[in-house]
Amino acid sequence: MAGLFITFEGGEGAGKSTQIQMLKSTLETMGKEVLLTREPGGSKGGELIRPLLVSGEADWDAVSETLLFSAARRDHLTHKIWPALKEGKIVLCDRFSDSTLAYQGYGRGNNLEIQKVVTDLYKIVAGDFEPDLTLILDIDPKIGLKRSCERTGNTEKRFENMDFSFHENLRTGFLKIAQENPTRCHVIDANRSLDEIHQKIMEIVKEKL
Ligand code: Z5A
């Protein structure tokens, strides 16, 4: 496809949403056409599924969660991401498939069966398609959760409220994903100032451009 697909990943409060906005602004200043989107959500169907997953009203197990995230992703890809990439846009996505592997596959422990469900479903949903670049914002969950708790107005607390070991497992999962995909993934130390992190991200993105 003509465009470029960049995903942002990481645990709670790592600063993804903040950094993705900063990247969008800088790329637009450079004259690039950018689509900023997110998962779960991003398309009409995806946004309809999102509250089912993040509101905390239902206690889904990892398989049910994976099925719902995958349905939302398929809708997002077909209605939004793939058309934008075909038009040559840079698509920035706040979370994508690595979140499914980390949250559903590693969050409740290193569960190989669920990891297989996640990767098999991804093949059905997206085939061989994958991000051109993935930026993993890495932070100690103690700091990330503190940042998330201090943020006001957030009602999507389902994953935030998981116990601390869940968040430690997530971090391990994301770092393992990065290790296994060294060409696509870059781990960025997110315990720095906004500008320092943005500068590092720009170095990596410019190389890709
Ligand atoms: N999920 C899943 O389980 N499986 C999947 O396949 C997918 C998702 C796709 C929704 O995602 C939930 O779905 C998510 C995982 C799960 N879990 N939760 N919750 P989300 O990305 O929409 O969740 P979120 O709650 O919006 O994101 P987040 O991880 O909590 O936050 P963030 O985007 O990484 O951080 P932020 O909003 O940019 O910053 C948080 C606060 O920290 C804010 O007040 C900032 O001003 C502050 N901040 C940011 N950067 C810094 C620095 N550098 N220094 C100091 N303070 C900072």
Image: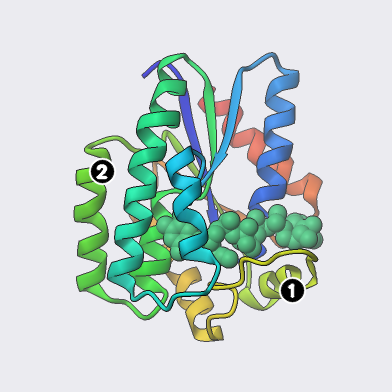
> What label does residue 125 carry, if any?
2
Residue at 80%, 66% in the rendered image: 152
**Which one is earlier in the sequence, the residue at label 1 or at label 2?**
2
Q: Residue at x 50, y 85 (%)?
A: 165
Q: Position of residue 132 (x, y in %)?
A: 42, 33
* Residue on which disc 1 sits: 149
Left or right: where 68 falls relative to 153? left
- Crowd class of label 1 (few under 14; some 14 to 19; many from 20; radius 10 Å): some
Residue 111 on image: x %, y %: 27, 76
**Can residue 179 be seen at all in this image of the molecule?**
no
Quadrant in the picture for residue 189: bottom right
- Mark 2 element type: helix
Disc number placed over residue 77 in the picture, else none: none
Q: Amino acid at mark 1?
A: Cys
Q: Position of residue 77 (x, y in %)?
A: 38, 35
Please say whether residue 191 is visible from this viewpoint.
Answer: yes
Indicate if the residue with disc 1 has its beta carbon within 8 Å of ligand 1: no
